[in-house]
Amino acid sequence: MIIIMESGATKKQVSKVINRVKDIGLDVQVNQGKEQIVLGLLGDTRKVQDIAFHSYEGVETTIRITNTYKLTSRQFHPQDTVVDLDGVKIGDGNFVTMAGPCSVEGLEQIRKTAQMAKAGGAKILRGGAFKPRTSPYAFQGLEEEGLKYLRQAADEFGLKVITEVMDENHIDLVAQYSDILQIGARNMQNFKLLTAVGKTAKPIGLKRGISGTIDEWLNAAEYVAVSGKSPVIFIERGIRTFENATRNTFDLSAVPLIKKLSHFPIIVDPSHGTGVWDLVPPMARAGVAAGADGMIVEIHPDPENAWSDGQQSLNDKTYQKMMQEIQILSSAMKEISSLQELTVRR
Amino acid sequence: MIIIMESGATKKQVSKVINRVKDIGLDVQVNQGKEQIVLGLLGDTRKVQDIAFHSYEGVETTIRITNTYKLTSRQFHPQDTVVDLDGVKIGDGNFVTMAGPCSVEGLEQIRKTAQMAKAGGAKILRGGAFKPRTSPYAFQGLEEEGLKYLRQAADEFGLKVITEVMDENHIDLVAQYSDILQIGARNMQNFKLLTAVGKTAKPIGLKRGISGTIDEWLNAAEYVAVSGKSPVIFIERGIRTFENATRNTFDLSAVPLIKKLSHFPIIVDPSHGTGVWDLVPPMARAGVAAGADGMIVEIHPDPENAWSDGQQSLNDKTYQKMMQEIQILSSAMKEISSLQELTVRR
Amino acid sequence: MIIIMESGATKKQVSKVINRVKDIGLDVQVNQGKEQIVLGLLGDTRKVQDIAFHSYEGVETTIRITNTYKLTSRQFHPQDTVVDLDGVKIGDGNFVTMAGPCSVEGLEQIRKTAQMAKAGGAKILRGGAFKPRTSPYAFQGLEEEGLKYLRQAADEFGLKVITEVMDENHIDLVAQYSDILQIGARNMQNFKLLTAVGKTAKPIGLKRGISGTIDEWLNAAEYVAVSGKSPVIFIERGIRTFENATRNTFDLSAVPLIKKLSHFPIIVDPSHGTGVWDLVPPMARAGVAAGADGMIVEIHPDPENAWSDGQQSLNDKTYQKMMQEIQILSSAMKEISSLQELTVRR
Amino acid sequence: MIIIMESGATKKQVSKVINRVKDIGLDVQVNQGKEQIVLGLLGDTRKVQDIAFHSYEGVETTIRITNTYKLTSRQFHPQDTVVDLDGVKIGDGNFVTMAGPCSVEGLEQIRKTAQMAKAGGAKILRGGAFKPRTSPYAFQGLEEEGLKYLRQAADEFGLKVITEVMDENHIDLVAQYSDILQIGARNMQNFKLLTAVGKTAKPIGLKRGISGTIDEWLNAAEYVAVSGKSPVIFIERGIRTFENATRNTFDLSAVPLIKKLSHFPIIVDPSHGTGVWDLVPPMARAGVAAGADGMIVEIHPDPENAWSDGQQSLNDKTYQKMMQEIQILSSAMKEISSLQELTVRR
């Protein structure tokens, strides 16, 4: 941490800050600039993140240098973490597809969707049983019944399952049916829930918050990581910006950025990232090319009659076509990987 | 709801949409424009909010006209709702101050703060016992011990209590000690929590989400309203924007806008709205002038040694000065109210 | 400026950076932290703002400490600058109102508006003759004819004039008719235009850009300030955010913040800040209470038939009512100022 | 356009609106809903975009349906526009690279960069001679001298030229040296400049504004299109959001969206889109996969000593490597195109 004093700060004001820092057990290096004194704090500055040096007289501003997350950072854990669900691997260099409807609507609907998903090459079935909805009058999900149908359909077609858990009290229930527990965008900073799911040892699909910064997202992952052994799968799903031609602004730069800062895998969600079905295939392709470890995508046998998110769901024809494209681009990416070094230092 | 067909939509495509609408029991009025057909849906369109007309062939876009909230809307309930805590009223035309530290740090700290708060004219004591923190390594609150100290200090100085509840499983505990249950910004769309607190009959202080739209905020209030009898107190605390000279962008327009759309009171939080202590008094004054029903503000007997949020907390001197200013502006606002009608129609 | 090296940076990498800094004539102080080396640059770091230390091997990041603006900063010029237009003063502690239509539509319309403006207590008449419009098919202004009408109407009622100049080639023309030259939000970073208007010696009303940060705004003012003697009047008019219930998000925190960082006056524009006529009076009141030096507001004798921005324009009745309110709050603010010190240090 | 009346609107209020619409020569269709009357306007509603129906008594809101741009829209001009610079084509299905330094710094620097650019397969040389800079004290470009060096270097290596024009008065000068005239992000809504460059008949590289919406961008292109024959090349360069881990948020969804709405080509700028050199190659790859017609990228023979934007510039090694990757992905995209139809209707 660096503390920048005001240009007119007195000696007494500077001493007061220095003494406080030393009290905590850190060292201070004093830089006497031409305009301002700048203090560099040496040691584990995680200890001082709660101290309001800002509010000391004579202090202009403070700058944090060290990250507040650790278990999540690549610096701490240089090798890629690969999530392994009985052989279905996420983060091993292959592009994994998770596909399924927004909501589980019934057994027949989820069975048909699972069949579609499988045919296209997806390995994991998605589907909502507990749905977070802006309005209390919107469909809230089939709950446990939905979980059962989802598991049954996945098992029939040899797929793994990912589904959202919204409530600490439902973790055990959802964990019984699902291979990956998904934390939705609205819960990225529901710290109690993060702590609780971290104790299950199941992989956690952590969606980026609607206005979650990269730094907050990494810290949210840290809540999971410190509470147990669950690996995290980051899911980029778009952020809220001024642009409303799309449902969200799909921030694909997050893919190489998270890969630089963390060892956990990252997948993309072009359905929520754009909100419009015909933008999904190009953005899925872009996700492959950006280096994502996979994607999660909404498909439906009959989007026009979907109970939710129909406008961003692919039907069988468009989904199968997209999967062919993904296949071609994945091969191209393998070829690129085999060029000696993917990110050379200039 | 209005459905706009593409300029090249076929008769068959139009019929398909119309038939679907009629199946649900709504009427349709067909407008044959020069370029496009536009369908107007007549009836309670809350029924169709989940149907993906977007995904029908030939449909260009759909536009929702009716709000999805009802109990929260002023249209449904024209008179102002006044929250009454044994005589401390919020929404009756007076400006009520809630003041206190970010975190309860111990009995002595909260007693001193309560004394300060009272001296300045605050009626309600704030203080966090359960703290939502970006990093798992930051101070998380004194929990039940903090609640006890908070209640004890409030009682000693004749104050009411507001404090945050983060977790469905702590509602009973927090409700035992607090007069108002606060839902934090990160939980504005934690729908399970909203539903659960709505059942307590305690007033709910509902902070606006970090990127919560006015419409989402009103819908979040609706979750509380439909689940029981708890009145809502909206708390504007700034939204996340590109500007980072302040912690958040304090959106004071929300005050007259919420008052137009809803009957529940709204207060402002200039501490989180700005994040910088010396911007707090001018923004508190602006809140009074905008017509807010009150404010919630962070104060601390010794901000330099606060365990959290010290940089945005007022000390005794600055707080007392601000309260004098608020007093003067509140009187001016009374004078303004007595001009015949505050918002005349042009 | 501070340069933070990566935790694994080599001695050679560190030396390379240090040597580059010394070549430019600055001193360096080296802080050997436990994890990372941090270099503090001492001297006038404005010299190094274009050097890409980011791109040096072993450098993690760089942090700028000193502002890049100087003539605009309060540090350089501690006293308030008061703009004086033959006795109409902006920045002397009084709240000045500039009022008028979005567009000058004809002589009669602007005369009627000037009369309204004057009756309410405005000192300055606003009105667009050159209009920046999103669509090329929208009304673009009466141009020179409009300027003539504007001046004539202002003179008749003893008002000063503010109007926008969009084009370097029209500066002389506009300066002939207007007392203040306004730079619109879309031109906040039209650096050629800023430089050119700075040479006129007329006061420049500098609107904040649609997504202009406080720092960029101050730097834009610096372009004006370095090119001549024109004082700047900052105009806060709202910024673009995700919220679309209002036309913009009106950032009133900018008022105390700009007053802290700069000596130039700042006024507010609640018409563009909200975009909705019935939100204008409460936000104008809030502007007074936040400490603004004045406001610019859209009024029209017949908003329903205005050629542009009718939805955010006040009619005679609502405008006169608002001006009464402003009067009452201005008196309250005088009383507050007379309390010994407005911003005491805690 | 659709006008939605308030639920309590009177007959007289409704008639007043209807009469106004008919006065302009449009037809109205009246929908009597259960809660509200909704008026549909039939005819060319471009005529009414300036009328403030919002401000009529009894009107709740208005909704625009028809776009305000026409020459730019694909509806009006279904075939792709291909820009042809003596055989170098943009928009014909190939991915074209424009590469070069942020600023032209001298003849040797731009010659070396042109050689690099050519070796990697770029067809067009970029380089700034007039530079828009946030601070007036930053390097502002070599101006005409820079243009000469740029042209000379391009000619030597058989490249075309793109460079920015910031000022109406420099258009002739810049057009003498450059094949494409670039309009920078800060000038996307400098309507005078757009109109003026549109008269040159040169292709216009139109960068998206820092906070430009897709709709505003298309309207800005319309200013160019209506004023002459210049084709537009859209350049997505990232938008301003709350996220500051990257310089901008690179909005790749704009690629398929612009291709859907307009016939003009679109290229991407991963250098400004991310602001960090090691994020440039993955985002360039993503641009190819999203279907962009090309890219513009910053390269420098010695980024550490670049006069501007060094931190986001690629050196020779990283650039050549990226171009190999682009080559591989472009081939993959050709293969994808040859699958019968790229965007099938579901």
Image (cartoon, coloured by chain):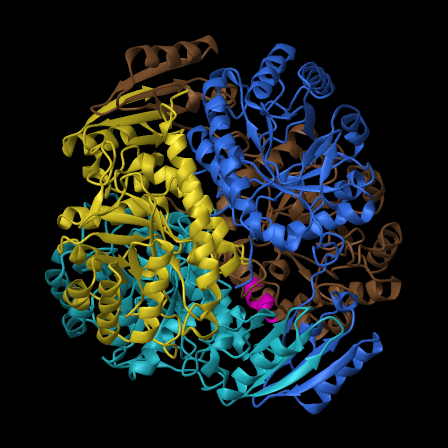
Chain colours: A blue, B brown, C cyan, D yellow
Q: Which residue is at 33% across, 82% downward?
A: C226
Residue A211 versus residue B167: which sits nearer the camera? A211
Residue B274 versus residue D309: which sits nearer the camera? D309
Q: Which residue is at 81% across, 59% downward?
A: B104
Quarter of the image where one finds residue D80:
top left
Residue D158 versus residue A325: which sits nearer the camera? D158
Does residue B337 appear in this view?
A: no
State yes or no: residue B264 in magenta. Answer: no
Quarter of the image where one finds residue A176:
top right
B75 relative to A155 in the view: left or right: left
Give percent across and percent down for residue C135: 24, 47
Give percent across and percent down for residue B93: 58, 50
Q: Is residue A30 above or below residue B197?
A: below
Give percent across and percent down for residue C268: 40, 64
Give percent across and percent down for residue A260: 62, 54
B202 relative to D62 in the view: left or right: right
In the picture as drawn, the residue positioned furthest to the left comes out as C145
State which quarter of the image contains the C terminus of chain C.
Answer: bottom right
Region of the chain picked out in magenta, as a range = B278-283
Q: Which residue is at 79% across, 51% downward?
A: B130
Does residue B99 appear in this view?
A: yes
Q: How many marks?
A: 0
Residue C140 versus residue C150: which sits nearer the camera? C140
D84 relative to A57 in the view: left or right: left
Examine the residues drawn in magenta and state their main secondary structure. Answer: helix
Quarter of the image where one finds residue D252:
top left
Q: Is residue C252 above or below residue D19?
A: below
Q: Is residue D245 above or below residue C308?
A: below
State which quarter of the image contains the N terminus of chain C.
Answer: bottom right
